[in-house]
Image (spheres, helix red, strand yellow):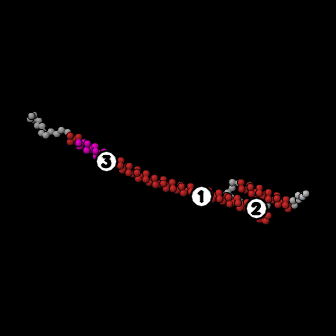
Amino acid sequence: MGEVEAPTPQQRRHARTKAKLRAALEALSSSTSSAPITAAAVAREAGVGRNVLYVGHTDILEDIRAISAARTAVREKREDAARTDAMKIRDLESQLASLATENAGLLRRAREAESRLERAEKQNAGLLRQLVDARRPVRLRPEDPDNPA
């Protein structure tokens, strides 16, 4: 039967480095920081040189690119939503300004109507006084105090 060969020291070192890099990548990707994940940041977090990534761990570089692309897509989606919300807010502000202008015009017209009504009521009261005066009996002959008829 075949014997399984023991890994060489280089293979063990490569595996340990890959495990460190994966752990560093996981830690950086799960953080809430908005800082971009770069090869330098992953290497620094893992405690290895940046060249190690470029020379022997291109799969980690591909994962960094994939995570960065996913974060960019999420950020762009949020920015699009923010732009949409800003447009809605501007539209609502415009509608509010239009309603305020219309309301001011209606208020002015209502005040003018109240003023006209007050003038009409005063005029009506004056006319009613004249009507009452006109309906009072008027003597056709003046009374002569010397000659009672």
Q: Amino acid at mark 2?
A: Asp
Q: Earlier in the sequence, mark 3 or mark 1?
A: 1
Is 16 located above or below residue 133 in the figure? below
Which residue is at the front of the view, 135 or 16? 16
The crowd level at tag 1 (other Cα within 10 Å; few <14, some 14-19, many 20+) is: few
* Residue 40 seen in the current view: no
Q: Which residue in the structure is indicated by mark 3?
A: 119
Task: Report if the CB atoms under discs 3 and 1 are less than 8 Å apart.
Answer: no
Q: Residue at x 44, y 54 (%)?
A: 101
Q: Which mark is residue 49?
A: none
The image quarter containing residue 29 is bottom right
Q: Is residue 82 left or right of residue 64?
A: left
Q: Which residue in the structure is indicated by mark 1?
A: 80
Q: Which residues are magenta?
A: 121-131
Q: Earlier in the sequence, mark 2 or mark 1?
A: 2
C-alpha separation, residue under disc 3 versus residue under disc 2: 89 Å
Q: Earlier in the sequence, mark 3 or mark 2?
A: 2
Q: Position of residue 74 (x, y in %)?
A: 65, 57
Judge whether residue 50 is colored magenta.
Answer: no
Q: Amino acid at mark 3?
A: Arg
Q: Amino acid at mark 1?
A: Asp
- Tell which tag, 3 or 1, sits nearer the viewer: 1
Q: Which residue in the structure is indicated by mark 2?
A: 59
- How many labels were placed on the picture? 3
The image quarter containing residue 8 is bottom right
* Residue 32 seen in the current view: yes
Q: Residue at x 25, y 44 (%)?
A: 127
